Amino acid sequence: MGRYLLLRLADAVPTILLVLTLVFIAMRILPGDPAIAALGDMATPEQLQIFREKMGLNAPLWLQYINFVWGVLTLDFGTSFMNNQSVLRLIGYNLPYTIELTVVAMFLGVGVGIPLGVLAATHRNKSADSAVRGFSLLGYAVPDFYLGALLLITSR
């Protein structure tokens, strides 16, 4: 059992590094300057330069990547560009809401999915089965961000 866990952990390391690399690259190729996004259009060049030095944005890209990976490995996610707070603190603040949303979604998914699956299985190739398949296809087709915004609007 311990050997199996070590092998799974060894398999996870390249995947985690790949994800970290993709996130780093994605954040660097997005258009716009983080310093201007954080300080605004009216910031002076001196303010922008100070911000870039403080956040390490003026370092070479390879050094930024090493600092990024090291920060993740040591659970030092740095400081948010937008509100100058610790990212770990922001994650900790929002974690209870994320867990609550996950638990509710899981119970809703199980509470709706299993009965509908049983209904579809017991009425195979009949109208109930077709309705359940159509409902599930609609659920897959609607983007999560759109459905989430729609649910937020309708819950008020």
Image (cartoon, rainbow, N blue to C red):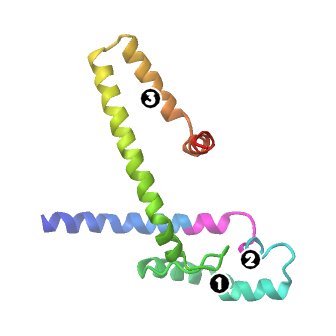
Residue 59 seen:
no
> In the image, residue 47 lies at what x, y percent?
80, 86
Which residue occupies 34% across, 36% down?
111
Q: Earlier in the sequence, mark 3 or mark 1?
A: 1
> In the image, residue 26 lies at what x, y percent?
60, 63
Amino acid type, callout 1: Met
Please tell me which residue lies in front, 146 or 13: 146
Q: Find out whether residue 76 is within the magenta segment.
A: no
Farthest residue, direction front: 156
Q: Label 1 near label 2: C-beta < 8 Å? A: yes
Highlighted range, magenta:
24-35
Q: Which label lies toward us, 3 or 1? A: 3
How many numbered callouts? Answer: 3
Please, what is the dominant secondary structure of the magenta stretch? helix
Tag shown at residue 35: 2
Amino acid type, callout 3: Ser
In which quadrant will I find the N terminus?
A: bottom left
Q: Which label lies toward us, 3 or 2? A: 3
Q: Earlier in the sequence, mark 3 or mark 2?
A: 2
Determine which residue is flagged by label 3. Answer: 136
Which residue occupies 47% across, 59% down?
97
Would you call the spot at circle 3 few (<14 residues within 10 Å), some (14-19), or many (20 or more)?
some
**SS class, disc 3:** helix
Which residue occupies 40% across, 47% down?
104
Which residue occupies 41% across, 16% down?
130
Q: Is residue 36 above or below residue 23?
A: below
> In the image, residue 149 lies at what x, y percent?
61, 45
Farthest residue, direction left: 1
Taking the image as shown, residue 148 lies to the left or right of residue 59, namely left
Determine which residue is flagged by label 1. Answer: 55
Q: Is residue 25 above or below residue 86?
A: above
Q: Is residue 48 above or below residue 16?
A: below
